[in-house]
Amino acid sequence: MARMLRRVAVVGAGAAGLCAARHILSRPNTFTHPAVFELSDNVGGTWCYEERVGTHDNGRPVHSSMYRDLRTNLPKEVMMFPDFPFDPELGSFLPHQEVRKYLLRYCESHGIRPHIRFNTVVENVKPVAVAAGDGGETTMWEVTSSESPGCRKTETFDSVFVCVGHYSNPHIPNIPGIQNFKGKVLHSHSYRFAEPFSGQSVVVLGAKASGLDISCELAKVGAEVTLSHRAPRLSVPLPTGIRQSSTVVAIEDDGRIRFQDGSVAGADVLLFCTGYNFSFPFLDANRLGLDIQDHSVSPLYHFLFPPAFPSLIFIGICKLICPFPNFNCQVQFALAVLDGSVTLPPRSQMEDEVLREQQEKLQRGVKQRHLLVLQHTQWDYCQMLARTAGFAPLPAVVCSLYEEVWRQRRIHPQNYRRLNYRLMTLQENVKTRASDIT
Ligand code: FAD
């Protein structure tokens, strides 16, 4: 008897959704063409720069947090999907426009575009129990989408890939007295370029990738920047015009800012570079047995599957990773589960494993809000996915080069992107050692 092809829905046509669609399309004996839902009229998600901030004319919030002069913080040699290189003519660290072009090329080369439903927002994804051939029950997914308000459609799928990103919903910490601040308050999600801040005093909260990058941009146009963060004082050379301070603890009645070290200062702008919250408005977390908080989604077995409903698959949920290679591994693993070549343990075992891993991390001092941070453990994680599902592991050079770039970023936050040729050389060097590392 011919096997039924499985129908898969993919929510989002950013890098993760495109990657999912590409691998689904490459398995025509197992899956029908995917239905890719994309709320905008573009592919690329985060990499579609929009000067507009806030909401579109149709009331939809602006998704991308890209700023005008952003250059990648990873070199193209590690950032790429392992089977799809960037243009060899380009340098290592790219302006965001080049990443968008790359994703467009990926989309066209793999014939994904005809399967994308643009301007279509997924409003609801819910599990439904249906009778299985063996007399038991199986879970299917009802996906309700709307092309224009009021024009809704509900379709049924065997599985849903959630690929909606997690850099769109600004996280703003609670600062007592914030309503007293008399200047401008914004989040990096709505920062586009530095010129409007020229000559202003700006307190930037947070010194991770965006906080540091944006501070450097602001200092270049003559803003007076206070980089306020809880990490130990950065010992790296920062551009003139940036001074470091402890965290902001409150806004005084007179609108001045009080810092943790007791100092108080005025400012024209408070710029939150404090990260983003997870948000899946189309999912009912309770029903799925998930706890979705600002910074965590749990339990997810292998950071992919809710144990109670493992045919719902989250791609790209981890933080501090090399995104495209990570998505590529996650998608291939998930498809191996869906096509039956990998069998997941029973629900209770998956739940226990996730809980045990989380408890181990918490005991090691990892904060609750960092439970999805992989950083150095991302390589073992990707290796494990590849080994279990039997696909090619990431080349060892990706790990070596990524770790080297992180080292350079810490030492030269302003200049590490100039290391183009040195990195290329390093890649060659590391390649020769690759067999030692694996
Ligand atoms: P997204 O790119 O956010 O795509 C999600 C898509 O889902 C969007 O197109 C959105 O419109 C769509 N969508 C959302 N909700 C719905 C819905 N309900 N219905 C239908 N469609 C929906 N990564 C790097 O590798 N290198 C870098 O240098 C780098 N720099 C970055 C700089 C900034 C400022 C930011 C914010 C991120 C950066 N990243 C970088 C990380 C980047 O987010 C990932 O590389 C990657 O693009 C994430 O892809 P994604 O598909 O998971 O999410």
Image (cartoon, helix red, strand yellow):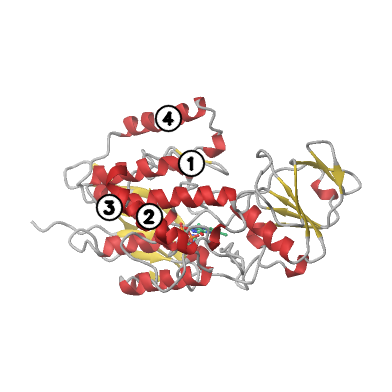
Q: Is residue 335 visible?
A: yes
Q: Which residue is mark 3?
A: 335
Mark 1 or 3 closer to N-term?
3
Residue 27 placed where, x, y %?
Answer: 22, 61
Please name whichever residue, 426 or 288, is drawn nearer the observer in this view of the structure.
426
The CA span between labels 1 and 2 is: 17 Å
Single out the residue that lies furthest toward the left.
1
Q: Amino acid at mark 4?
A: Leu
At x 24% / y 49%, what residue is drawn? Answer: 336
Please name whichever residue, 423 or 276, is drawn nearer the observer in this view of the structure.
423
- Label number found at residue 372: 1
Q: For numbered disc 1, what is the local secondary structure?
A: loop
Within 10 Å of disc 1 (Cα), the crowding (few <14, some 14-19, many 20+) is some
Q: Which residue is mark 4?
A: 355
Residue 364 placed where, x, y %?
Answer: 50, 27
Q: Amino acid at mark 2?
A: Pro
